Image (tube, grey):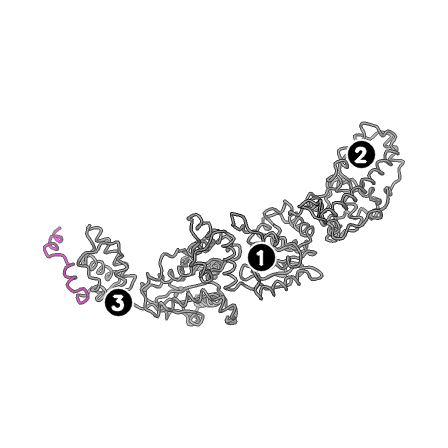
Amino acid sequence: MPGVPPDHDTDHDTDHDHLWDRLHRVEQRVRTAVRERRADDPDPDDPYRGQYLGPEAVERILASAAVTTGHGTPAGQDAPAPPPGSRLARLGAAFGLLPVDLDLLLVALAPDLDPRFEQLYGYLNDDLTRRRATVGLALELCGLPGAGAGRFRFAVRAPLIAGGLLELTEPDRPLLSRTLRVPDRVTAHLLGEDEPDDALAGLAHRADPAARAEPMGAAGALTPAEAGALTPAEAGALTPAEAQAVDRLRAAATAAGGGAVYLLDRGGHAGPLAVAALAADGRPPLVVDAAALAARPPGATVRVLAREARLAGGGVVLGPLDRLEPERPERAALLRELCAELAAVPLIVHGSLVWDPAWSRESPVLVTAPPPDADGRAGQWARALAAAGTPLDEELTDGLAEAVAAYRVDREKLARAASVAARTAAAERRPVRAEDLRAAVRAQNAAGLARLARRIEPAVGWPDLVLPDPTADRLRELVLRARHRDQVLGRWRMRPGGGRGNGVIALFAGESGTGKTMSAEVVAAELGMELYVVDLSTVVDKYIGETEKNLERIFTEAAQVNGVLLFDEADALFGKRAQVKDAHDRHANLETAYLLQRMESFDGIALLTTNLRANLDEAFTRRLDVIAEFPLPDRAQRRLLWDRCLGPALPRGDDLDLDYCAEHFELTGGSIRACAVSAAYLAAGAGTPLGMAQLVAAVVGEYRKLGRLVLESEFGPWLERLRPAPEQSGAAGRR
């Protein structure tokens, strides 16, 4: 439209024209009041007016009427109604204001828009230091008696006061002489400002889908707040399940009567669905961080939040609820206060906790958020990486879905991980690779589990394993289950009943040293995760019930990280239940029963290793997804193990015969590794390449450590060479 500035529109002009017109009417009332006041003033030119009370003024007060009836026309009769759709009209509708309330608000607002009113109000208050309207003056200017029903428009539960549109200062004064003040945020809103209140900085932000659709800046990194504000509509097409959830949310949040809606979140991606539901209904979503809310003083913050939502005519998205910790009494009281203050505003709370009816006066409508499937998760990663501005290498571009299939991160961690991976690649001036994603996802793991288990960053791969084909096949099946469980258990609905989780549980059974722990490390490396080995010393407790509590902490923390949980020597915890003969047996059976239930509901990846599979309770077998047997290595495998354990850097003598070692020494991979290290020390001490004599000496030491007999049939001529000469033995005896 010609003549209209680019940052304003016709609605803004209409709002301002009406606001200034109403302010002009307030000015006319003030002029009338000033003329009448001066007409009754015996000395209108007194320079000390408002600073003292003279005898004539006292007599005039005593002679005046006991109850003033006010000046001018009653409020609202001479003022036109605000134009439909204007900010003043929307303000009145959102806060339930009567015409008289709008007049009282404008009287209090006048000094914030025109400084002349400060002097005029000082004169009318008969106190030049009081330059804002008092309750009595506002009622007088609006034609309302101070002793009538008008004073109740300033009660605690009155719309102007309860909604935070007016503040009464100087509470020690009588009501009629208290000063009125309009908060700066309300003034700014009426003048066209849409930025949230400064008091909400770091706590809430307004999600703007239209603005978010613009290309991101050069930095490209998403902050946690921005990551939570992205809607599925901005990020891509909704899946049918997500679209259905958004429709249900939209209907529930805007239903007559208001009230909260609780979006049960099982995948950490419910926030964008809540934002999309409000935005689809034309309500600007105000996204609130639950953790930041918990750190603020409850009363004032909640009122400012409620006022902001009503000013914008939008709704509030609060979450994740878990960060608010509503189990604590003071946090539950904060949540109840928030639900009560936002009773007239669409409120969507999302989180993974089960809603407790004690958290609100009215129970919310429950909607379950569908977790993203494999394709949806790959799309989220693709968009987050594209927003970060660093290209992907060709291999990752073609296999992104498979590369991120095993990662279970919420939207905030996903955005941070994508940003870290992109910045890591950009620092080396190359495209993003799969290993960048693995490192970035591992960096998002909290430190809680590291305090309960030993963290191992995988440093081995499939080429480092020497296993029979059936065992290797079981390990690949385990990786396959971990990557495609969302598709099989989620999209194809192959999950059994009974509250079983989406976790993958595997058992590695075999003698010590056969490669069980190393295989767990390889599985973690293949999935791009860290390995967490449960330390039994931090779990087992002699006091009844403490072991179960320690295990619960481990399972809870493990479900929140992208890691593989390893219970080494699992038969110590998962032993068979025995016939109850005393209290100790009963308690041991309770521990096993708890583990049976908890493992079944676990959503992560857990590996159990044992040397004695027969010691495990049979009930665990049914709950295991994969069982891998680790047999003793055969001759060919031992030959390969000897070669790999010695490595390429260790100098080897000409007499080194690894075929002989593989043929005669029946050792596990762990023992072969120990022999190789011991032999390397002997070679380093002698300052010569590793020879057969040093290697056989290391094997003899390993045999004695294991309690095995050193037989000539196994060691052959090498055993004779290791024996000391007779004269050396005699000399040693004489010494």
Q: Which residue is mark 2?
A: 123
Disc ID at residue 636: 3
> Amino acid under label 1?
Glu
* Residue 512, position as x, y percentages in the image: 32, 64
**Dot 3 amino acid type:** Ala
Residue 154, x across and y down, in percent? 77, 47
Q: CA distance from mark 3 to mark 1?
A: 57 Å
Cα distance between the residues tagged 2 and 1? 56 Å
Task: Give the SS element for disc 3.
Answer: helix
Secondary structure mainly formed by the magenta segment:
helix
**Circle 3/circle 2 CB separation < 8 Å:** no
Count up the numbered dots: 3
User: Which range of residues does the magenta coloring cover?
Assistant: 712-735
Is 160 placed left or right of 540 in the picture?
right
Residue beneath label 1, please?
Answer: 234
Circle 2 SS class: helix
In terms of secondary structure, where does tag 1 sit?
helix
Distance from the alpha carbon under mark 3 to that under mark 2 = 105 Å
Q: Which of label 2 and label 1 is nearer to you?
A: 1
